[in-house]
Amino acid sequence: MRRKILIVGLGLIGGSLAKVFNRCGFEIHAFDINHKSVEIAIKDGIVKEKIEDLEDVEDEYAFSFICVPVLESIEILEKLSSKIKKGIITDVGSTKAQICRFALQKGISNFIGGHPMAGTEKIGYENSFDTLFKGAYYFITPIDINSKNEVEKLKELITSIGCRVEEIDYNLHDAVTGVISHLPHIVSAGLVNMLNENSIFCKFAGGGFKDITRISSSSPKMWADISFSNKEVLLKLINKYIELLTNFKSNLESNSYSDVYSYFERAKSIRDKIVSDEIK
Ligand SMILES: NC(=O)c1ccc[n+]([C@@H]2O[C@H](COP(=O)([O-])OP(=O)(O)OC[C@H]3O[C@@H](n4cnc5c(N)ncnc54)[C@H](O)[C@@H]3O)[C@@H](O)[C@H]2O)c1
Ligand SMILES: O=C(O)C(=O)C[C@]1(C(=O)O)C=C[C@@H](O)C=C1
């Protein structure tokens, strides 16, 4: 008998997981408020069964993945944890402190937080693909009440789809992703918001602008949820970023060429190292 995986939220990430787990031989069942995406996935041969209502979920899944925007995830976890007692429940949300604290508070010991550091600016099942996670880092944020055996089982599953698993404390996770993912999305959207639609700026936007703003085509719901879910971290980071720009501004005002040069020189050296480490 094929082992079963439940996916709640069959969008870009849920759909990509469904595709890779189906390829690995699991039987996939799925629930999404957008029933169409599950129906298409059944036609594609990716999903075997559509769950009509989360109240009807049976305790038959080895793994259940919550793949909805982060502010929706807690309610889903609350519902699933009242039904699923034998298998592991995990999520893919971009923030981890809020949901892990909730699981701790409610004593949901079969919940183990997760987060793949892979994605695109596209939304929905129609843009999902089975190689999205290949070679990507995948954070796992266990809590004290998890069984070590179950944490190992989740790590094994994630490794089997080609990810590099990193176990990390949930607070540290949110501090790190605040810097390398959440603040960059806020900044990128800010640059785009400086323009007006159809303006001369849009017409002439070149490679540089398109590179730094690609991620601004991402889901507004996903990013509004992340911003509130990681609010305390982001408020501090935004202050730091304002300070950085303020320093740059005063160096420019005072014609301090060497300081302005150093701003770009430091950035180049760090960015070049990130890219060269990736190739190794
Ligand atoms: N997109 C990325 O780059 C990326 C990367 C890593 C993690 N994540 C995380 O993955 C999660 C999903 O993001 P995505 O990119 O797949 O978004 P998406 O918009 O492509 O998919 C979300 C899906 O969840 C469904 N949904 C929304 N609310 C629901 C609910 N209450 N019950 C059932 N289904 C619901 C939507 O209909 C949609 O199909 C988010 O928590 C996000 O933070 C995203
Ligand atoms: O490549 C992109 O489009 C992404 O934004 C992916 C990205 C990221 O910031 O790196 C976005 C959010 C996730 O939680 C993980 C990955």
Image: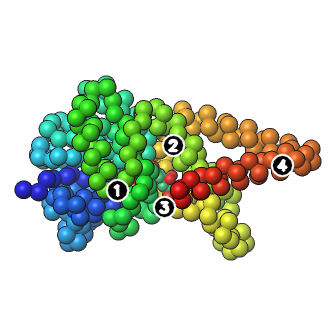
Query: Which residue position is annotated with label 2?
Result: 177
Amino acid type assigned to the residue bearing label 2 in the image:
Thr
Mark 3 or mark 2: which is in front? 2
Q: Does ligand 2 reach within 8 Å of label 3's beta carbon?
A: yes
Residue located beneath label 3 in the image: 121
| Front disc: 3 or 1 | 1
Residue 207 visible, this angle: yes
Provide the residue designation for mark 4.
260
**For residue 140, side relative to residue 263 (left or right):** left
Nearer the observer, disc 2 or disc 1?
1
User: Residue furthest toward the right?
Assistant: 255
Q: Which three-letter amino acid code belongs to the residue tagged 3? A: Glu
Q: How is the image coloured?
A: rainbow
x and y percentages locating residue 267 in the rendered image: 71, 50
- Say which residue appears at 15% left-offset and 63% top-offset: 48
Give the distance between the C-alpha atoms of the residues marked 4 and 1, in whole angstroms. Answer: 42 Å
- Along the viewing direction, whichever of 86 and 150 lies nearer the viewer: 150
User: Element type at marker 4?
Assistant: helix
The mark nearer the N terminus, 3 or 2, is: 3
Location of mark 1 (residue)? 162
Count of number-bearing discs: 4
Q: Earlier in the sequence, mark 2 or mark 4?
A: 2
Residue 169 location (% of width, % of height) = 42, 32
Cβ atoms at labels 4 and 3 below 8 Å apart? no
Graded by Cα atoms within 10 Å as few (under 14), some (14 to 19) or many (20 or more), the crowding at tag 2 reads some
Counting from the top left corner in percent of width and height, residue 216 is at 55, 59
